[in-house]
Amino acid sequence: MREKLDPNNLPRHIAVIMDGNGRWAKKQGAKRIFGHKSAIKSVKEITEGCVELGIEYLTLYTFSTENWKRPKLEIDGLMRILVSSLRKELDTLQKNEVNFSAIGDLQNLPKVCQKELREAMESTRNNTKMQLTLALSYSGRWELLKAVRQIAMDVQLGKIAVSDIDEHILVANLETSGIPDPELLIRTSGEMRISNFLLWQIAYTELFITDVLWPDFRKEHLYQALMAYQSRERRFGKISEQVNS
């Protein structure tokens, strides 16, 4: 399937809502945390697949601000998995020349998580093959509110005038500043919603929804999403004749 892809029509940026870990674990007769542990293989596969294809940016929705409402036992387990995974996979990130970053309200994460994130970002900051971003303690509404507050503060301090505020100013204050908007958003588990993810950035993003649960997601599923992407006409409000001309 990979050979059927047009290498000249690949997205620069792919975003993924990794959903279905709990349901996958339930099907195995196991606790939810088993699904989260098993999901690490999918993260590795998709990261590797994107590197091989030359995708420049991959953003994974890892933990939302709403996820803090989950049982404490599950949250603690997720944080332990995050820390252990960063430690185990750092060498792989270096080998594949992946630049690692994280977006979200990171100060809400446990101190040990913040430490591992800082170390991973610092040690991979010179890697240039692909940027892998984890969205942690993140939501689109939180991001937009944070940006509006920062812009209001800049106006109050006299750094900018109200008349200066435009899309460029807003984008510069988003967590994803410096990263192009994703052209493709993949959501696993068949849910038909975007779950408060990259609300500004996905205005014209192509959506690919699959019934595959995230722990089962592999490279062939990534290729399926890319084939669907390449079959579509991206018009950005124009008509077909304008795009084709």
Image: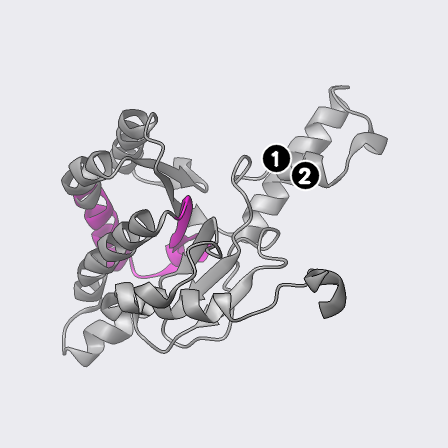
The residue drawn where x is 76% and y is 38% is 166
Q: Is residue 118 left or right of residue 6?
A: left
Q: Nearer the viewer, residue 34 or 15?
A: 15
Q: Give percent across and percent down for residue 193.
A: 51, 70
Q: Is residue 3 left or right of residue 164?
A: left
Q: Nearer the viewer, residue 81 or 175?
A: 175
Q: Is residue 104 left or right of residue 43?
A: right
Q: Secondary structure at mark 2?
A: helix
Q: How is the image coloured?
A: one colour
> Does residue 158 sit above or below 60 in this rendering?
above
**Marks 1,2: beta carbons within 8 A:** yes
119 in magenta: no
> Does residue 72 sit above or below 128 in this rendering?
below
Q: Quadrant of the N terminus?
A: bottom left
Q: Secondary structure at mark 1?
A: loop
Disc assigned to residue 191 = none
Tag 1 residue: 173
> Does residue 104 sit above or below 40 in this rendering?
above
Q: Give percent across and percent down for residue 25.
A: 20, 72
64 in magenta: yes
Disc assigned to residue 170 = 2
Q: Nearer the viewer, residue 126 or 195?
A: 126
Q: Give percent across and percent down for residue 141.
A: 58, 52
The CA distance from mark 1 to mark 2 is 5 Å
Where on the picture, by quarter, is residue 42?
bottom left
Where on the picture, by quarter, is residue 147?
top right
Dominant secondary structure (helix, strand or loop) of the stretch shown in magenta = helix
- Dot 2 surroundings within 10 Å: few (below 14), some, or many (20 or more)? some
**Which segment did they paint magenta?**
55-84
Which residue type carries mark 1? Asn
The residue drawn where x is 76% and y is 62% is 242
